[in-house]
Image (cartoon, rainbow, N blue to C red):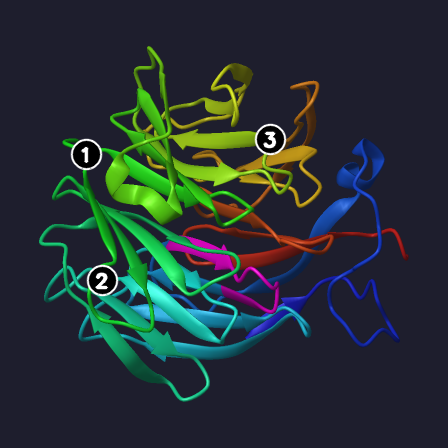
Amino acid sequence: MYNNHFNYLSGYNQFYIRKCLYTDEVIKRFKKAREFTVNKAMITCISFSVNGQLMVTSSLDDQICVYDCNTGLLKRAIHVDNYGADILRPTSFWEIFFSSTKLNDDLRLLDVNENKYIRFFKGHDKRVTSLAICPYSRRCLSTSLDRTAALWDTRVLNKVGMINHNSDNSVVAFDPSSLNFALGVNGSLLKLYDCRNVMNGPIKTFKYANVEDWSQIEFSSDGNFCLISTNNDVIRLIDAKFGDPVQVFSGFANTVKIPLRASISPDSKYVLSGSTDCLVHIWNLNTGQKVKTVVGDKFGPVQCVAFHPKSMLFATASYKNTSFWRPDIFE
C-alpha cells in the first residue's frame, strides 16, 4: 500500500514531529518519508483537517482517501462512484465536506468512521470552484461557476448566507480568527467579509491588475497574509489587513496552466508549491528566496501540496501518488 522510505522516528508513537522550529536548514533536510500508490487516476485535491488529525485526497478515479496523521498510514479509501469528488475539506469531527463531479452540484458531508452520508446541501447549480472550513465552528464556505458564494452550517440543510459575485473565477477562505473570510473574484478583487454580517457587503475591497485566474486563497496562521495560488507560474502574497502586495513567488513551471495550489507553513514563514515538471519548491516567505527544490514525482505534475497545520510535515499529491515529507533531523 505504501513504501516507508525513512524511519526517522523509530521508537516514537507518532508519525509526525511536533516540537521543532522551521528554519532554512530544517527545510533543506525535508525528504519523502512515505509514498502511497492507492489511486489509479489524477489526484485533484489534498487537505488537512484543522486539528491535524486527518489528511484527505480526492481523485478522478472517484476515490476519497483518508490518512491518519498520527500514524502516517492510510485509514480508508472510500469509493464515491455515484457522485465523484472534486474539492474536499475535512472537519475536526471526522467528517468530509466535498463537492461532486457527477449527477449534480450538491455539496455533501460524509462521516469517515461510519462511511455514510450525513447531509446533502443544495444551492449551487454549476460546478463548485472553492471550499473552506471554519477553524472553530461548523461553518463552511463555497463558491461556484453559478457566480455565487454560499455560507453554510453543516448542522442545517439551507444556506445561512449568499453573495452574488458576478464572476466565473472565484475562491474563498476563512481567516484564522473565524470572524472574517476573504472572497477572491475574477483574479483582480479581494473582498473581506465579516461572517456575522455577510449581507451587509464587504468590509474591505482590494483591487489588483493581475492577468491570471486565482485557484486558491490561504491565510497565514498569524492572519497577516493571504497566499494566492494561480493557474499561472506565479504565487502572490498579499497583506491581509491593507491589501498591499508583499511577495511574488516564481521560478517554477506551469506550462499547461493548471490550477496549482500552494500552502503556507504553520509558523507563517515558508511557502510550498508543486509544478508541472514534477518538482516541489519551497520559499522563505519573508525574503522571497527559494530554499529547496526537490523531485516530487517522476510520473506527472505535482498539482496539490499542503503543510500540516500543527506539525513539521507536509504532503504532496501528483498524477497517482500521495507522499508525506518530513526532515531527517533525528537520523
**In-front residue for pair 83/296:** 83
Res 164 quadrant in image: top left
Mark 1 / mark 3, whichever is N-terminal: 1
Amino acid found under the numbered disc labelled 1: His
Is 327 on the left-hand or right-hand side of 253? right
Amino acid found under the numbered disc labelled 3: Asn
Amino acid found under the numbered disc labelled 2: Ser
**Residue 165 vertical placement versus 49 (above, below):** above
Of tags 1 and 2, which is closer to the observer? Answer: 1
User: Bounds of the magenta span?
Assistant: 44-55
Which residue carries the number 2 mark? 100
Residue depicted at x 59% and y 38%: 220
Which residue carries the number 3 mark? 224
Q: Quadrant of the N terminus?
A: bottom right
Which residue carries the number 1 mark? 165
Tell me the SS state at disc 3.
Answer: loop
Give the Cα distance between marks 1 and 2. 22 Å
Q: Callout 3: 10 Å neighbours few (<14), some, many (20+)?
A: some
**Residue farthest to the bottom, as pictured:** 114
